[in-house]
Image (cartoon, grey):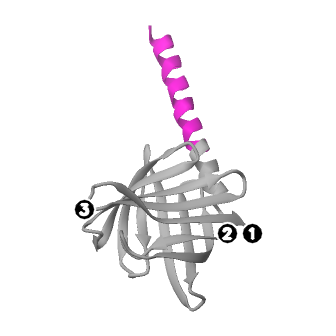
Amino acid sequence: MRLPLFAALLSFTGLAAGANASDAEFLNSLAGDWSGSGMILTRIGGMKVNVSCSLKSDASPTTVAMNGNCRALAAITRSFSAKVKAAGQGYTGNYTGPSGRPSKLVGSRKGDALNFAVTWAHVTNGDRSASMMIEKVGQNGLRLQTVDRDPASGRAVVTSRIDLQRQ
């Protein structure tokens, strides 16, 4: 009876290690220099601003740290950063946008995307909640996207979407 139980435990441990290796490979695939373009809403219902962005990402088997900036209207540049750590079956971290105040990220990986619930550092679009996705697109693409709820209608609105290519 003990031998089958021991074998089952070993195989379960191997599956867990395989999942961690998969996450490590995924996080490492996010490392590099990236550039591209996209759009940012100034606020829900507000003006859509086209941006060009660059991003440097460093990764380890358990973390990824991203530092970037986006330029709009040829003269306005805003910095942003994110640091995410694998934590058990999920991911936690911080995102710091143009305000300079860190917002909390809690989420999980599904396929080639990290999906986060965001708790903004201050009220944004009527509350402090939104969602953020960091998605690997093919071998050389990366998409950063935030979605918030319109306080008037309750519908989901993409408030930023930036598509980057590895340099």
Q: Position of residue 26 (x, y in %)?
A: 61, 50
Q: Secondary structure at mark 3?
A: loop
Query: Residue flagged by tag 3: what amino acid is it?
Result: Ala
Structural distance between the alpha carbons of marks 3 and 1: 41 Å
**Is 6 covered by the magenta stretch?**
yes
What residue appears at the point 45 percent right and 51 percent down from the top-left corner?
115
The quadrant in which the C terminus is found is bottom right
Determine which residue is flagged by label 2. 34
Q: Position of residue 141 (x, y in %)?
A: 67, 58
What residue appears at the point 41 percent right and 55 percent down from the top-left corner?
116
Query: Residue flagged by tag 1: what amino acid is it?
Result: Gln
Determine which residue is flagged by label 3. 152
**Mark 2 Cα shell of 10 Å, populated few (<14), some (14-19), many (≥20):** many
Name the side, left or right, on which 78 lies relative to 26.
left
- Region in magenta: 1-21
What residue appears at the point 58 percent right and 60 percent down from the top-left corner?
143
Structural distance between the alpha carbons of marks 2 and 3: 36 Å
Q: Main secondary structure of the magenta part?
A: helix
Query: Residue flagged by tag 2: what amino acid is it?
Result: Trp
Pointers 2 and 1 in contact (CB under 8 A)? yes
